Structures are given as structure tokens and as C-alpha cells.
Amino acid sequence: MEFHVDAREGEEPHHQWCLVYEVESSRVVHLHQHIAISPDAALAKEQLAEAALAQVPSGVPRERLAVAHPDPGVELGPDMTYVIDPESGRVTARPDAKTFYETR
């Protein structure tokens, strides 16, 4: 099935993302991205979190998981390592050392 939606003329798509992590270890188990056709079509944080949790493999008990919503300035990318502060839930990102050195 093909599905196509055009953004309104002059509007940029709105990117949202969050990370699902294990509370005990702060290990990220899923990085979730949602792209809305405009800022008006963005999901509420709760909706984004539910969509992300629904994508986590069933082998991870949901009660052991939490969702972190990065600040707008945190970079999203395949060559990044994400660190979640267990107390504040704050997300920081840094280039992944192995990927960084292998691709440079």
C-alpha cells in the first residue's frame, strides 16, 4: 500500500524524536523518530512516547522502560551515542567513537 502526504506549500516537515531506555541501566533500547507534515500536525509528548514504546520488542518489560525527550539542540544521527542522565532524564549526544574513527 502506498501512502503519500504533501506538506502545505511553504511549510517544512516537523521532526520529533525520543529515546526509550531501561530505567535501571539507562541503556537506550529504541530511538524513535516522527515526521509530521507541519508543526501543527506534531504529536504531543505523550503520544510520541506511546508510539515509541509500541515499537520496543516485547521481550523488554514495559515497567522497566522510560522515555526521554531530547532538547531541540541535541543532534540526531546514526553515528551518535546517546547518554541519558537517570536522575533528570536529560539526553546528551556525542559522536560514536568506533563509528567516528572507522569513517574518518
Image (cartoon, rainbow, N blue to C red):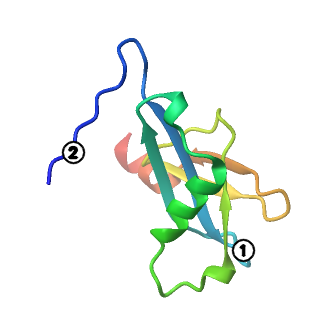
Image x and y of residue 50, in percent: 57, 63
> For the residue carrying disc 1, how many other residues have a C-alpha within 10 Å: few (<14), some (14-19), or many (20+)?
some
Image x and y of residue 71, in percent: 69, 39
The secondary structure type at the circle numbered 2 is loop
Q: Nearer the viewer, residue 55 or 83?
A: 55
User: If the image is split into quadrants, where does the C terminus sit?
Assistant: top left
Task: Please tell me the numbered disc located at residue 36.
Answer: none
N-terminal label among 2 and 1: 2
User: Most extreme residue toward the right, as rendered?
Assistant: 87
Assess whether mark 1 and mark 2 are in contact (beta carbons under 8 angstroms). Answer: no
Task: Please tell me the numbered disc located at residue 3.
Answer: 2
> For the residue carrying disc 2, how many other residues have a C-alpha within 10 Å: few (<14), some (14-19), or many (20+)?
few
Image x and y of residue 33, in percent: 47, 49
- Residue at x 54%, y 68% (from the top left corner): 53
**Seen in the image, is 75 located left or right of residue 8?**
right
User: Is 10 rendered above or below residue 36?
Assistant: above
The secondary structure type at the circle numbered 1 is loop
Q: Which residue is mark 1?
A: 23
Number of marks in the image?
2
